[in-house]
Image: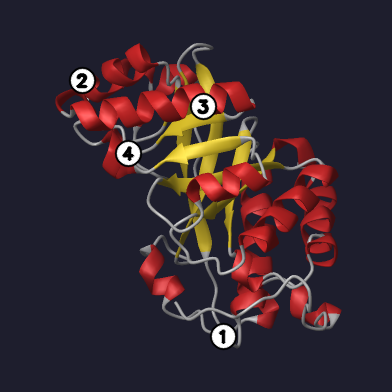
Amino acid sequence: MPLIPINADSEPAVPPCGDCRNGEALDFTFSYAFQPIIDLRAGSIFAHEALVRGPAGEGALSVLARVNDANRYRFDQACRVKAIEVAARLGMRSKLSINFLPNAIYRPEVCIRTTLQAARQFGFPVEQIIFETVESERIDDGNWLAKVFSAYQRIGFMTAIDDFGAGYAGLNLLAAFQPDIVKLDMALVRGIEQKKAARVIVAGVARMCDQLGIRVIAEGVETREELACLQDIGVHLVQGYLFGKPQFEQCVADISQIWPQA
């Protein structure tokens, strides 16, 4: 998607409050599917990642194709509200991981107000919310992303870098800011038990993150062999089809619902 250039030293003017509202500010609607993230050591559901879908469960591209430079900010704000609304309606007890568009944010301390209002309105605890950004989305200013993350952490949200190892920030971002969570790019996870280089890289990332106090999540786990290898390496938070595909407007209430699958 085209990006809106942002410079932390000369931020654009904050849009009026009407731009922050939920779906009524957009000319299309959407909802969410949720995929569980498993804590293998605790034997529990650590979080659910909210994945955008059409209003009747249509694929993400049916929604993302409607996003452009003119509505990117409003869409990002609406996504946060909708994810919290649906999670609260489902009675989600785990953490909720919401993807956000860092290039759609003008001033984090102002733009987060809509999220806080939604959390209060729907009774969803702020400390259960994780904001994750796709590392493969180009960020021209890593310092700006660190500023956004820092603002979120001060408020009480958890932060995560998605697709770590596949994008533009990587180790440079970690040197400037340490998120709560790093999510390994699934290309590193796929068939990891057969790839020595991938095992060495993942083990190195896991050791580094442990020393920095960062949790590691392996995405895209599809086989028992991948799972066993990741556990041997020391990665104990996992997500993938081995534990189930994203379910439209549904969440996993108890680990027993999916544990027998893996």
- Give the spatial CA distance, label 1 vs label 3: 37 Å
**Pointer 4: what residue?**
220
Q: CA distance from mark 1 to mark 4?
A: 30 Å
Which residue carries the number 1 mark? 69
Query: Quarter-wise, where is residue 102 in the image?
Result: bottom right
- Residues at marks 1 and 4 touching, judged by CB atoms closer than 8 Å: no
Question: From the viewer's perspective, is residue 205 above or below residue 27?
Answer: above
Task: Tell me the residue at 51%/79% (across/down).
Answer: 67
Secondary element under disc 1, as helix, strand or loop, is loop
Question: Alpha-carbon neighbours of circle 3 within 10 Å: few (<14), some, or many (≥20)?
Answer: few
Give the residue type that dot 3 points to. Met
Mark 4 or 3, nearer chain start: 3
Q: Amino acid at mark 4?
A: Gly
Instruction: Give the residue at mark 3.
Output: 208
Q: Earlier in the sequence, mark 2 or mark 1?
A: 1
In the rendered image, the quadrant that contains the C terminus is top left
Q: Quadrant of residue 156?
A: top right
Q: Nearer the viewer, residue 21 or 145?
A: 145
Residue 253 appears in the figure: no
- Give the residue drawn at x 28%, y 15%: 228
Distance, label 2 to label 4, CA atoms, is 13 Å
Q: Which residue is mark 2?
A: 225
Q: Position of residue 6 (x, y in %)?
A: 66, 76
**Mark-to-mark CA distance, 4 and 3:** 21 Å
